[in-house]
Amino acid sequence: MSLSTSYRTHTCGELRAADAGAEAALAGWVHRRRDQGGLIFLDLRDRHGITQVVIDEASAPEAHTAAEELRTEFVVQVRGRVERRPAGTENLKLPTGEIELRGRAVRLLAEARTPPFYINEPDAVIEEALRLRYRYLDLRREEMQRRLAMRAALVTAIRAFHDASGFVEVETPILIKSTPEGARDFIVPSRFQPGSVYALPQSPQQLKQLLMVAGTDRYYQIARCFRDEDLRGDRQPEFTQLDLEMSFVAEDDVMAFVEAMVIDVSRKVAPERPIALIPFPRFTYEVALERFGSDKPDLRFGLELVDLGSAVAGAGYRVFDSTLAAGGRVMGIVVPGGAGISRSQLEEYETAARRFGAKGLIWIAIEPDGRGRVRSTIFKAVGEERTEAIAVAAGAGPGDLVLVVADANITCQEILGKLRVEAGRGLGLADPDLLSYCWVHRFPMYHWDGENGRWDATHNPFSAPVPADEPLLATLSGDPTQPSPEDPAGRARAQQYDITLNGWELGGGSVRIHRRELLERSFALMGHSYEGMRERFGGILEAFEYGAPPHGGIALGIDRWAALFARVENIREVMAFPKTQSGSDLMLGAPSPAEPHQLEELGLRSVPPEG
Ligand code: ASP
């Protein structure tokens, strides 16, 4: 499709050698300007590329005078003739590098102040606050334009796949009643009903389930979600999910659909990046923790956790004995070739382990040249032979290093899981090109919330138990509103599945409870009184009395997915207008103080913070 307009015949990325001899008009920003006396060179830039313009004082004196006034980032239109560049001056790095536009007429469309940072230096290091304050300039940079385009391609591919699979895209409202996803709600006061508030959706969870009750069968949405929580690298107060829900499905149906969609979308958006394993590996939550110490394992490298309980039992090392006696675990990972690492690198592992919550880190190094030469923190206490036997039990050979942690079960697994990632990535074992997807499923339904004396959903409060575990949704007392930490409910597994990519949680979903009675029982375990749940979830509970189909769904973080495709760590890099770590929009200045009349209309008063 031609992108020509009344200002331009071509974009700045379009002209080629075959256009030589043609008349053309280009419009864009002055990327660079070089004044060589009689000749002025302009690199003219728009989103599509850069074209070199030459203005010769001898043949185009007026244009030359106009070009003398131009500065970087001025917006101009240039008319002239396309010519092949003189032999030897072609620029092979530019798609337009074989030609130049011999400018005859230069028209200034807008002047520009000197930008606060380089737009024409791809490697310039720019202060983050400046990038966010002047986001419209930051976005002019080629890299950022590429990311925006990639993100758009991602959403286009998602839509195409869903459309072809019988899904209906439905928009759900932004002003809703609170839908809990475990974060704090953003609230919007109502002017018509002073003292009442809307919540911004943490996700369209209840609405998509109601669409299933409505018979929509297959719903999806590129949905904006809002969660008022502390921000980290992969979090923003508002973010975008691919949200979907399907009727008459079991766990496998949803996972199979999502897997096919993810493969198709990945191949379209990043055709050059291999997908590590198809079908995607599936682990239960328990196995994922046991093997990788994480519910979002990075499978681009091995370094699996090894249980060392029997290898260390009776070795005479106090920490091991007391941990095992207390029902804890002693586990390790093998860092291949790690015996040769420096003292300071070892100390880095130790510091990392403590940062991850370990009381200490035990290591065993087997010297590369064979048997009998072991170094270790436990060498003195345990003796050479036994120390080596422990390392061998971990799967280590000559030249390897074993990192060992002793702690309560999940703590031990999680600390080693994080060390595993630190070691794997540090050793360069994580192939940056690979797209390594995996499923983790069958999470525990609940975890015990000791403070409030109730069970809490580990994921989604609407998730259904694994069918065989349905009878476990019960308390010892027999009354679901009187839960205790010993309840069978603590053993129930949910039909909950997370999809991960290269060690990031990309999305999560579940098959839902679709019967009112069971949902009420589950809510009661989670500490809701029957009146309380009617007040908070009355809409969906009532809907379930009108015939709800079995249904399930998932949501995938589009920002995270785009960040992983763009190979960036922070989702800000793939959002056009993100907020800072403290939730501010530095460009437009939000949040900003409310006007007194706004507060008055809403019946609100602002109380200055104490202190
Ligand atoms: N609503 C869930 C979330 O936002 C996803 C789902 O269960 O479909 O994480």
Image: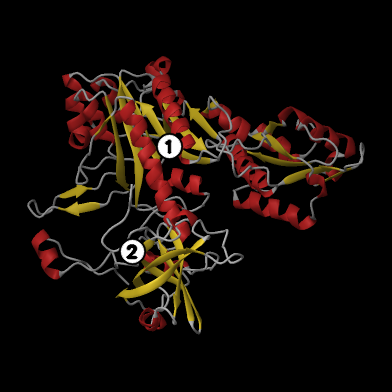
Seen from this angle, which residue lies furthest left?
192
Residue at (41%, 34%) from the top-left corner? 508
Within 8 Å: ligand 1 and the Cβ of disc 1?
yes
From the image, tell me which residue sits under label 1.
507
x and y percent of residue 468 in the render? 42, 14
Q: Amino acid at mark 2?
A: Asp
| Residue 161 placement, left or right of 392 | left
Quadrant where the C terminus lies? bottom left
Residue 512 appears in the rendering: no
Q: Decide which of 502, 143 is in the foreground and name it.
A: 143
Element under label 1? strand
The residue that disc 2 covers is 585
**What secondary structure is found at the residue carrying circle 2?**
loop
Compare residues 362 and 341 and report the one nearer the observer.
341
Q: Quadrant of residue 576?
A: bottom left
Q: Is mark 2 within 8 Å of ligand 1?
A: no
